[in-house]
Image (tube, rainbow, N blue to C red):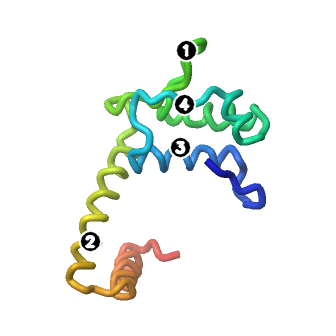
């Protein structure tokens, strides 16, 4: 894992997002053991309090479980928040849909226009 020291995003947030992305992309699975706070901090050459804060936030979101003296683990898939599981499922479906569009020679610009139109209709254009 690499952190961006010049990013406006705090290091603990970068750690949280990285772990969430690894979970969503199947790099991490329920039951996987994460590095201890100390190991993580040494590997990234950062303050252990930064790692601890990231882990505490992930624990509050019910993505990990911290078992003192045993380790830090990705929670069982049955106990994960529905939003993470749904996001993983939707990302997979979107990938298949995009692949289908690619095979039908639909251009990226067209797809982007469709997405923009959709969010305009639902009132979430940024």
Of marks 3 and 4, which one's residue comes earlier in the chain? Answer: 3
Of marks 2 and 3, which one's residue comes earlier in the chain? Answer: 3
Residue 69: x percent and y percent? 60, 12
Q: CA distance from mark 1 to mark 4?
A: 11 Å
Label placed on residue 6: none
Q: Is residue 63 above or below residue 93?
A: above
Q: Is residue 104 above or below residue 100?
A: below
Q: Is label 1 in a helix, a strand or a loop?
A: loop
Q: Residue at x 59, y 44 (%)?
A: 16
Residue where numbered disc 1 is placed: 70
Q: Is residue 33 above or below residue 45?
A: above
Q: CA distance from mark 2 to mark 3?
A: 26 Å
Of marks 3 and 1, which one's residue comes earlier in the chain? Answer: 3
Residue 28: x percent and y percent? 44, 39
Q: Residues within 10 Å of mark 4 (few under 14, many from 20)?
A: some
Of marks 1 and 4, which one's residue comes earlier in the chain? Answer: 4
Q: Residues within 10 Å of mark 2 (few under 14, many from 20)?
A: few
Q: Residues within 10 Å of mark 1 (few under 14, many from 20)?
A: few
Pointers 3 and 1 in contact (CB under 8 A)? no
Residue where numbered disc 4 is placed: 34
Label placed on residue 99: 2
Q: How many numbered badges does the structure rendering display?
A: 4
Of marks 4 and 2, which one's residue comes earlier in the chain? Answer: 4
Q: CA distance from mark 3 to mark 1?
A: 19 Å
Q: Residue at x 39, y 82 (%)?
A: 112
Pointers 2 and 3 in contact (CB under 8 A)? no
Of marks 2 and 1, which one's residue comes earlier in the chain? Answer: 1
Q: Is label 4 in a helix, a strand or a loop?
A: strand
Q: CA distance from mark 2 to mark 1?
A: 42 Å
Q: Residues within 10 Å of mark 3 (few under 14, many from 20)?
A: many
Q: Is label 3 in a helix, a strand or a loop?
A: helix
Residue where numbered disc 3 is placed: 19
């Amino acid at each position: 894992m690499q952190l961006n020291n010049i990013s406006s995003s705090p290091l603990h947030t970068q750690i949280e997002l990285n772990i969430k992305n690894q979970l969503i992309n199947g790099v991490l699975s329920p039951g996987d053991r994460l590095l201890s706070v100390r190991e993580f901090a040494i590997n990234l050459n950062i303050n252990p309090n930064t790692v601890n804060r990231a882990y505490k936030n992930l624990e509050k979101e019910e993505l990990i479980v911290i078992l003192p003296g045993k380790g830090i683990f990705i929670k069982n898939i049955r106990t994960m928040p529905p939003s993470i599981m749904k996001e993983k499922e939707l990302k997979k479906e979107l990938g298949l849909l995009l692949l289908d569009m690619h095979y039908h020679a639909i251009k990226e610009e067209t797809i982007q226009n469709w997405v923009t139109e959709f969010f305009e209709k639902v009132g979430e254009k940024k």
